[in-house]
Structures are given as structure tokens and as C-alpha cells.
Amino acid sequence: MTVFKIDPEFVINDEDALRGLFPATHALAALKSRDFLDAHAQAFIRRSPFLCIGTQGLNGKADVSPRGDPVGFVKILDQHTLAIPDRPGNNRLDSLANIIANPSVGLLFIIPGFDDTLRVNGQASLVTDPDLLETMRVNDRLPRLAIVVRVSEAFLHCAKAFRRSHLWDPAHVQDRTEMPSLMKMLLDQTTGVPSDEDAMRKLDDGLEEDYKTSMY
């Protein structure tokens, strides 16, 4: 594949140049942002089983991580504060380490079947308060910590991206078998894929079994 190089002549380097490319935003888009979770934002969060959290470390390295659980897994502590349980993962801790370095986070809440989303920005803390963690117990297991976010901005986001992507349209569901399994791709990227198909199948089955036993 040929290496792509950006022509500096076509790079936007300042906000005035950026805004000159677009019409001015309309009043509703500017006014919709709140610095607290109103009734609609709270209702949206209580229905959401999935969010993405964006973080950034002091070195400028950015990360986006998915978080999912049963509906209502994000706890609304008050109009300005929410808490996200941290469930078992691969222990890279990218998002959590970033929060220690730089507490600014961005959240995108998604509800299956909804084309609109909720965006929340704020300052995050990593909290091990046992009383809070107890409210997040699932299958008799507690999270090790919670990400507590002090909300600075919350607003609903329109449906254009989801409608362009046809994300919830059954006619656009793709066949997972058209790509290798996750385990096979990871091995291909790291230690190499075993030539024995039975060995590969056992590794795939092992991952599925791990999902069953280590979700919480």
C-alpha cells in the first residue's frame, strides 16, 4: 500500500479557517448544552446499556474505550455527577491511567434502536468507595473501582451519523464469518496463528468460555 502524505497546502491550522468552511451553527445547537443532567439526560442514561469513554494522557495520547452492562448500569448520583462501574477487561488500563494523568473525559451514551445519542463531558475520578461499589454489584461480584464523573456539559446529539451508517437496520447487518475470529486476528498480529485448525478452534472456544466466566 502506498504511503499517504498530506499536502500542507490543504491543512487547516486555525479555528477561523475551520469555521470559514461551514455555515454558522443555528441557535438551538448552541443553546442545547447544559452543565447538569436534566430530566431528559437522566432518562437517556437510565435506558443506556452502552457508552464510549474518551480520555487523553498528559503526553497527548488519546483513547476511546467501550463500556457496557445491563440497562441502568451508570448510576446518577445527582444532577452533576454520575458513576460508571469498571468491569474486568484486559488490564491494559489505558482509560484509567489517562484519567489519573488528565481527568477530562468525554462520554457518548447509546441506546439500541435510538438514532440519537447523549454526549457528556466532565472531570473524572477513580473511586473505591465500598458503599458506591455495592450499588454496582452484578452476579454477586463488585467492580474494583468506579469512574465518577463531575458533569460540565451534557447535550443530545442528532441522528445523522446513525442514519448514515444504518447501524440498527437489519438489512445492513454484516456476516461476522466474513472476517477471521478475534482470537485468530490477535494471534496473527502477535505470536502467529497455529496451522492446526483444531488447535485454532480450541483457542476460539476458550475465548468464548472466558467470556462466560469473567464478564464480572
Image (spheres, rainbow, N blue to C red):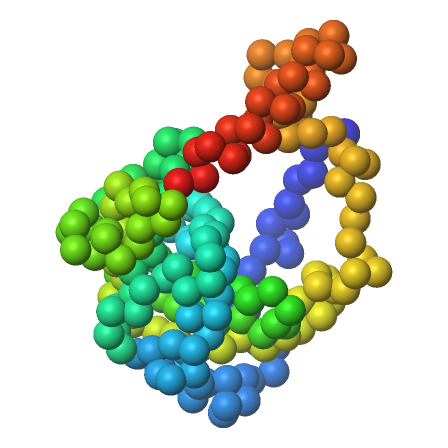
Residue 135 lies in quadrant: bottom left
**Quadrant (top left, top right, bottom left, bottom right) of the C terminus:** top left
Name the residue located 46 percent from the left edge and 32 percent from the top edge: 213
Furthest toward the bottom, the residue is 27
Count of picture labels: 0
**Quadrant (top left, top right, bottom left, bottom right) of the N terminus:** top right
Asked if residue 85 shows in the view, the reply is: yes
Furthest toward the front, the residue is 140
Name the residue located 27 percent from the left edge and 77 percent from the top edge: 79
Asked if residue 99 shows in the view, the reply is: no
Residue 170 in the image, given as x and y percentages of width and height:
79, 61
Residue 214 in the image, given as x and y percentages of width and height:
44, 34
Residue 85 in the image, given as x and y percentages of width and height:
33, 51
Left or right: where does residue 84 sit relative to residue 182?
Answer: left
User: Relative to the observer, which residue lies in front, 114 or 160?
Assistant: 114
Residue 168 lies in quadrant: bottom right
Left or right: where does residue 6 sit relative to residue 173?
Answer: left
User: Relative to the observer, which residue lies in front, 130 or 172?
Assistant: 130
Q: Is 28 rendered above or below residue 57?
A: below
Q: Is 121 rendered above or below residue 140?
A: below
Furthest toward the right, the residue is 171
